[in-house]
Amino acid sequence: MSTIQTICVFCGSSAGKRPEYSAAAQQLGQLLATERIGLVYGGGGIGLMGTIARTVTEAGGQVTGILPAVLRGKERPEAASIGQSYGELILVETMHERKATMARLSDAYIAMPGGYGTLDELFETITWGQLGIQTKPIGLLNVVGYFDGLLSWLERAISDGFVQPAYRDLIVVEQDPAALLAKLHTAIPPTGLVRLESWRA
C-alpha cells in the first residue's frame, strides 16, 4: 500500500509557450486534491508553480510552499493575500534551505517542465537517490516530450559508463499525470550506493 501523503512538485516559474504545460499542471493539481495528497512546492504564485498551487487550493487540497524570502516579491507578487490564495507559505533564507525543507516535507517528487531551477531541484534529488541519502520515488512528467532530450542524455551517460544501468530506474517517466501518479504509488527505487542509515549516523 502506498505511503505517499505529500508530493513535492518541481516546475517552472514561467508558464511556458504551450498550453499543454498549464493544462498538465491543472490536471496534476486536481489529482492531488482528489487523492488527498498534499502539494509541497517552491512557493511561487506565477507560472506553472502558481497554476498547480492555485488548482490544488481551489479543489480543497493542502498546499505548502517553500520560498526564499528574497524571492517573495518576484515569485509571489500577490504577497498581501498569500495565505488566502495558496495555502501555507514557509519563508526560508537560502535556496539550499528551500530544497532541504521541500525534501523533508515530501514523500515523493514530480518534476514538470521548467528551467534551470527545476533541473537543479530534479538533479539534486536524483543524486540523493543514487547516493542513498533519500529513497523516495521520483517522477518525471514528460509533457509533450519536454524531457526527451534529457532522457536521451541519460541513455548516453549509461552507454558511455557514467551512470550505472540500475540507476535508470531512479526516475519514473510518464506523459500523463494520472499514469505517473499511479506508478509512483508502487515504485521501488533502486538501492543507493550508501545505505540511508549511514547518512543518518
Image (tube, rainbow, N blue to C red):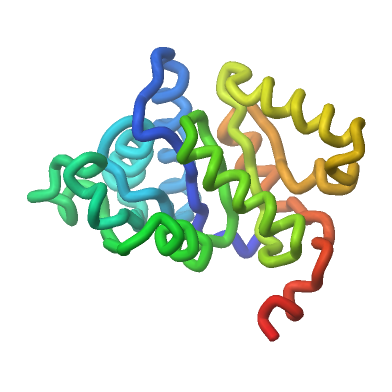
From what the image shows, is residue 91 above or below residue 35?
Answer: below
Q: Residue at x 70, y 62 (%)?
A: 135
Left or right side of 9 for 93: left
Left or right side of 182 for 86: left
Q: Quadrant of residue 154?
A: top right
Q: Residue furthest bottom?
A: 201
Q: Nearer the viewer, residue 186 or 115?
A: 115
Count of numbered circles in the view? 0
Q: Residue furthest top?
A: 18
Left or right side of 18 for 144: right
Left or right side of 127 for 194: right
Q: Residue at x 62, y 18 (%)?
A: 145
From what the image shows, is residue 144 above or below residue 46?
Answer: above
Q: Position of residue 34 (x, y in %)?
A: 45, 46
Q: Which quadrant: the N terminus?
A: bottom right
Q: Position of residue 97 (x, y in %)?
A: 42, 63
Q: Position of residue 77 (x, y in %)?
A: 16, 40
Q: Nearer the viewer, residue 2 or 110?
A: 110
Q: Quadrant of residue 193?
A: bottom right
Q: Residue at x 57, y 50 (%)?
A: 109
Q: Which quadrant: the C terminus?
A: bottom right
Q: Residue at x 36, y 60 (%)?
A: 94
Q: Position of residue 172 (x, y in %)?
A: 71, 41
